[in-house]
Amino acid sequence: MASTSQILRALMSGDRLALVIALNPKAADVIPRGPQHVVQFAARQKAALGGEEVELNPQPLPPGDPSMGAALLHKMTAAALASRDGFKRSFLSDIDDWCGTGWPRRWPKGWPVPGPRPGPVETAQLLLGGLLAAADISAHYDDPEMLEVFDAAIEMLGEAAVRQLNG
């Protein structure tokens, strides 16, 4: 049997299914893809996002999956909202760092050591994943200042993705 707070939470959310499950948890077993589906979805999403914050292998995973870009942008948004410097300054600074500044003209020859590097398509996919996440997050805000910041981020990410593809 559910507690009063669980029933009230289900009523306030307007989710009828949550209310039925709060009243009788066995009801979730009748639903195809019941609670087990949530666990499987969470496991798939965790795998798609690259696992935990800290993993045993310190080598970074190459970009290429747009969901990694979306996850990165969500984390950047949360960090910028908590920043002391203010959301706009912190967020756009992070986006600018992410988009890159291009290759320097007078780079020493023979360095950096060649190694596995993501191709332009994989990098563009990562940036486009971030672009789509920024568009999704901005759809939930009404504040003109927040919309302006997200519009600037979308513009910067789109330009960086096109630069990657045009080489």
Image: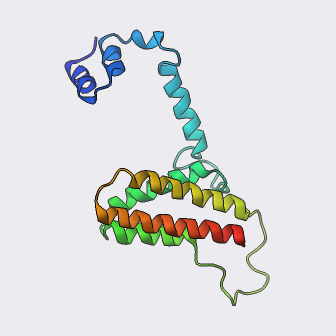
Q: Locate the C terminus and report the quarter of the image it occupies.
A: bottom right
Q: In this view, does 166 lie above or below 132?
A: below
Q: Where is residue 94 in the image (x, y as percent from the top left)?
A: 46, 68
Residue at 63% x, 78% y is: 102
User: Viewer-proximal residue, 116 or 126?
Assistant: 126
Q: Position of residue 5 (x, y in %)?
A: 21, 23
14 vs 162, left or right, is left
User: Viewer-proximal residue, 122 or 141?
Assistant: 141
Residue at 21% x, 23% y is: 8
Residue at 58% x, 58% y is: 128
25 vs 42, left or right, is left
Which quadrant holds residue 104?
bottom right
Residue at 47% x, 20% y is: 35
Which quadrant holds residue 126?
bottom right
Asked whether the viewer can see residue 103, the reply is yes
Q: Locate the N terminus and report the quarter of the image it occupies.
A: top left
Q: In this view, does 3 lie above or below 61?
A: above
Q: Position of residue 68 (x, y in %)?
A: 58, 51
User: Viewer-proximal residue, 152 or 114?
Assistant: 152
Asked whether the viewer can see residue 83, the reply is no
Q: Position of residue 114 (x, y in %)?
A: 79, 71
- Give the image's coloring scheme: rainbow
How many numbered dots are placed on residues in this image?
A: 0
Q: In this view, does 88 lie above or below 77?
A: below
User: Viewer-proximal residue, 30 or 1?
Assistant: 30
